[in-house]
Image: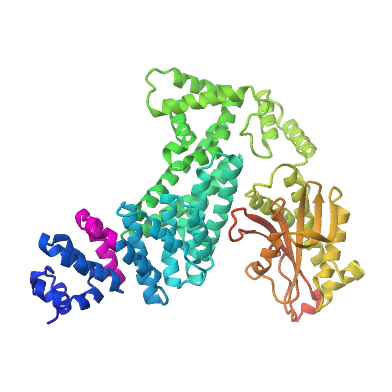
Amino acid sequence: MSTVQAITRLLGEGLPVTLEAVGGLDAVRRDAEDLARSPYLDVLAEWAAVAARDDQPFTDELLLSGFANTIHPLGFRGASDTLLSTPTLCSRIATKLDGILETRAAERDNDREGFAAARALEVALRLSLANAFPPYRLFTTLCEITPNENGLFAEHAAKIAGVAFHTWRDDRLLRVLDTLRMIAEARVEATFEYGNALMSVALDGTDRAEVIGGLEAARVLFGEAHELDADRSDALLYASVIDVARAFDGGDGVEPLERAVGVLSEAAADRAFLLSAGRLPDWLVARRDRDVQWHELLEAVPRLASDLERKSWYKASEVLGRLLRVYDAERTVPGGEGLSMFLRPRIEAAFVRREALLAHLDDLLDDAEFVGDNRGVAAKLRGRIEAMAGEPQPPGKSGEDVLTGELRDVLGDIEAPPRFTEELLAIVRAWVGWDVVIANPVVQRLYSSLRGSLAASVDYVGTVRTTFDALVLQVICFCAARQDAASSELGQRGAYLFDPSAHESGLQQDLHDFLAGNLHGAGIQTEVEGIAKGRADIYVGHGGWRFLIELKRHKARVTRKNATKYVGQAASYQNTNVKLGMLGVLELVQKRTGLPSALEECIWYDTVLPKGDTSVRHLVVFKVPGNMMRPNRLSK
């Protein structure tokens, strides 16, 4: 009986697999070559771990030969577990094993080799994490990854590259993850890990604009990962973390925050269930811990938003305890300093606006029994409030309805009649241009939904926001009007809508004329040269900033999925200006047998994160159904 057969028999009978049980060292020497290729690399590691001093040179070499030759991934994992739990063995073979693992990780021409290469890379990562040898060989292998990799290897490499980045923060690994996103089998994992890495970088930032931009890019990637695989609750979890933080920063009320935290809670529960189904590798445990920390911190945000709108607190010490924990996010969650940039301004502004809340904080600081870490946080908050008191426009008053919110508070204090209050608020809203009268409820819903989605953009603020809103509303109205209007109403300019061989040039001229007649504060041009080394179909200029509309023709039903083939070109026009634009598609279904799509299905929001870039492009995509049929032809 060979040594390999003896091991198989002993394992089958549940007996200890010792050197003596398989025939002793001489028998093992005779079968060394077969053992090195067998599935029992973990057994070889156990022999080396307990070998007598005189036997160690042979058992060590046998183990190294096994790492160099076996193609069985489970053996790789078991052997690495034994190696890492036996420091003396690790110190004996680590130097020689380093080169072997690099060689094995480079052999990945097929699935069998690819899986073994992935396990070799995992062992190299775990040994590097344990400081058994420096990680430069691991980096070398990862940085040599190309878009043509074996898919099985690439999928595992994405997770390894993500963990390596969080440990050593080498920016080269960001490029590796971006490359892995191009490989079909690795796309979901690489997209999630790339988002995780960009979120980590953003939360380490000290500049608010950079933090917002980084989180914006990460949110897009998490959304993409979850869209590709609905079971990726980890992607939904982190997307929800960003949504909650941005909503709180934007001044959202309790109900929207509760909805966002509800999504976060469901994703966290689902992720906890999935992780409980199997053993999580030690090198991923830290991530699970961070998931829990995010959830515990942000579930307090909706209640805090409600507390901050009150004039005073009945149980002030209880509220302040929750508040200080959120205010000092970096002490609660690793990497929370960047998160604090979203959470702190609204808290600070509430204390500046409401003296009664400040009195609660002062009472707490005057309490001699109030000691510990929270006292330092409370003192930091009080110091920030003092600094803000002299500022003409204290930060944190985010949200477009802050002025009317404060006016409502004042009117309530003087007990103004409800009717007078609402009439005055309506006048103020109209005066500042926030209320747009939209009679059509479908147009109203679309406009509101798109504005909510666009809020994720760092450029969607101030006057840029106002002008883009105006453009969005006009495009919605254009789409509605073109579905409603008959050929007799449109005349020659609408002839393209009834022509089965129409080109997008007809849509271009029609949309140009519509916008030129309705957007009086913008310069509307067509075929403008010198934009991203190309030519813009429709250019909407506002002096320092511009919005560009790319137009295409599609000879089939246009869906959100197949429209993505055009978004790259449309997004490229945003490279040197604000990252807001539009894509319009003329839909030509050659044998239309049913109704055109409802207006709600003709306009949507999309994002693009170009390869090698971390600035998200934001697009409003719309389609205009062409080759239209008259309603009477749809009757049977």
Q: Is residue 87 magenta?
A: yes
Residue 372's spot in the image, x, y percent?
Answer: 37, 26
Along the viewing direction, whichever of 120 and 235 lies nearer the viewer: 120
Is 25 situated left or right of 308 in this image?
Answer: left
Tell me, yes or no, if residue 313 can be seen here. no
Residue 306's spot in the image, x, y percent?
Answer: 54, 36
Q: Which residue shows up at 70% across the image and 32% down it?
A: 418
In the rendered view, would you say 115 is above or below 142? below
Tell me, yes or no, if residue 40 can be seen here. yes
Where is the C terminus found, in terms of image quarters?
A: bottom right
Where is the N terminus found, in terms of image quarters?
A: bottom left
Residue 616's spot in the image, x, y percent?
Answer: 62, 54
What is the count of numbered marks?
0
Q: Is residue 51 magenta?
A: no
In the rendered view, would you say 588 is above or below 584? below
Q: Quadrant of residue 273?
A: bottom left
The rendered magenta stretch, by its main secondary structure, is classed as helix
Q: Which residue shows up at 28% across the image and 68% down it?
A: 67
In the rendered structure, which segment of residues is drawn in magenta?
A: 73-96
Snapshot colouring: rainbow
Is 481 situated left or right of 217 in this image?
Answer: right
Residue 88's spot in the image, x, y percent?
Answer: 19, 55
Q: Which residue shows up at 22% across the image and 54% down it?
A: 87
In the rendered view, would you say 252 is above or below 621? above
